[in-house]
Image (cartoon, rainbow, N blue to C red):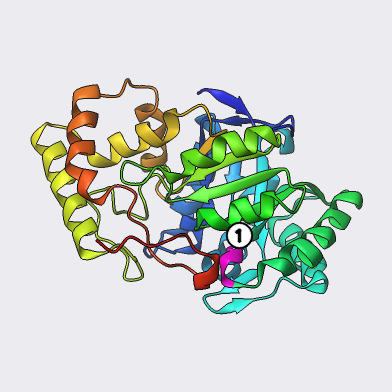
Amino acid sequence: MEYRLLGDTGLSLSQLSFGASSLGAEFRQIDLQEALHSVRVAIDCGMNFIDTSPYYGRGMSEVLLGQVLPDIPRDAYFLGTKLGRYAPNHFDFSARRVAESVDVSLHRMRVDHLDIVLCHDLEFVDMSQIVEETLPALKREVQKGKVRFVGVSGYPMKMFRWVLERAEIDVILTYNHYTLQNDRALELIPLCQDRHVGVMNAAPFSARLLTDAELPAWHRAAPDVRAAARRAAEHCRAAGSDLAKLALQFSAAHPGFATCIAGSASPERVRQWARWIEEPIDQQLLADVQDILRPVHNRVYLEGRPENNDPIDDK
């Protein structure tokens, strides 16, 4: 497993990290014992960063992590969670809720500190609150020793640039924006390097779009994007491979991202991913798939407030 520094934090993160949204049953019903074991397997495979949020399973992900983390040495992993989003349409980025949310997360996961805390999906709110109220409150939690590093996460690229120009943060987490279908997050790397801000990439499969699995009901991809992804999956199968494998290898390979976060409540799936990233990318298959996806390259969708979003190309 390769390890990379996260900005100026001093944290050296594994190339592939464990995303605990799966523990919140965000994609399917899960087996409790398998879900708990998947965390241990991830650590055993060399994944040293765990990403979660109180939003995942409306607290379930953090609670399940609290059942397994006390049995794992604290220096064996870094732990990141989020705050501000607690249900599909429930957002609270107030300073009062920041302090409460940090304490609740610590209690649920039964740890004494959080390595990273991110403002979650800030594109849904007035971003001036994030800069003027939320981040200052979060930095007070750093001063208390409860949190080590702070940052923001979400979907549109526009909001990252906005925050970077107005606030001092340690890290950003971008998702669905460095995949086989969409690589817009590349524009963030030089901006963040100039400011010594670490960048983490999440969702290499684009919420199952770049796999053979059925998409969740809430998926936002347009029909032509879905159709192109299906053609890519069919091409990979015909070549004796798997689109998911290619997607993971591609998203985890770029050294500009400190880590690639992917989650599963299946221990065997986690082991499989750890094996995949050690194998070389099939360059011809990669070129073929990128050609299939070219007509929908960098197609995005609206998430949150329109004013916080990038221009939408509906072609």
Residue at 56% in and 30% down: 14
Residue 192 figure quarter: top right
Residue 246 figure quarter: top left
- For residue 285, side relative to residue 53 (left or right): left
Can residue 14 be seen at all in this image of the molecule?
yes
Disc 1 packing (10 Å; few <14; some 14–19; many ≥20): many
Q: Residue 118: horizontal and vertical position, in percent?
A: 67, 55
Q: Secondary structure at mark 1?
A: loop
Q: Of all residues shown, which one is farthest toward the top?
A: 280
What span is in magenta?
120-124
**Does residue 34 show up magenta in the picture?**
no
Q: Amino acid at mark 1?
A: Ser
Residue 83 figure quarter: bottom right
Residue at 52% in and 67% down: 57
User: Relative to residue 58, is residue 285 depicted above or below?
Assistant: above
- For residue 132, side relative to residue 66 (left or right): right
User: Relative to residue 280, is residue 79 depicted above or below?
Assistant: below
- Near-viewer residue (71 or 90): 90
- Near-viewer residue (21 or 153): 153
Q: Residue 6: horizontal and vertical position, in percent?
A: 65, 33
Can residue 48 be seen at all in this image of the molecule?
no
Q: Of all residues shown, which one is farthest toward the left?
A: 238
Residue that badge 1 annotates:
53
Q: Residue 243: horizontal and vertical position, in percent?
A: 24, 40
Overall secondary structure of the magenta stretch? helix
Residue at 91% in and 50% down: 143
User: Relative to residue 98, is residue 168 depicted above or below?
Assistant: above
Q: Residue 98: horizontal and vertical position, in percent?
A: 78, 66
- Near-viewer residue (29 or 113): 113
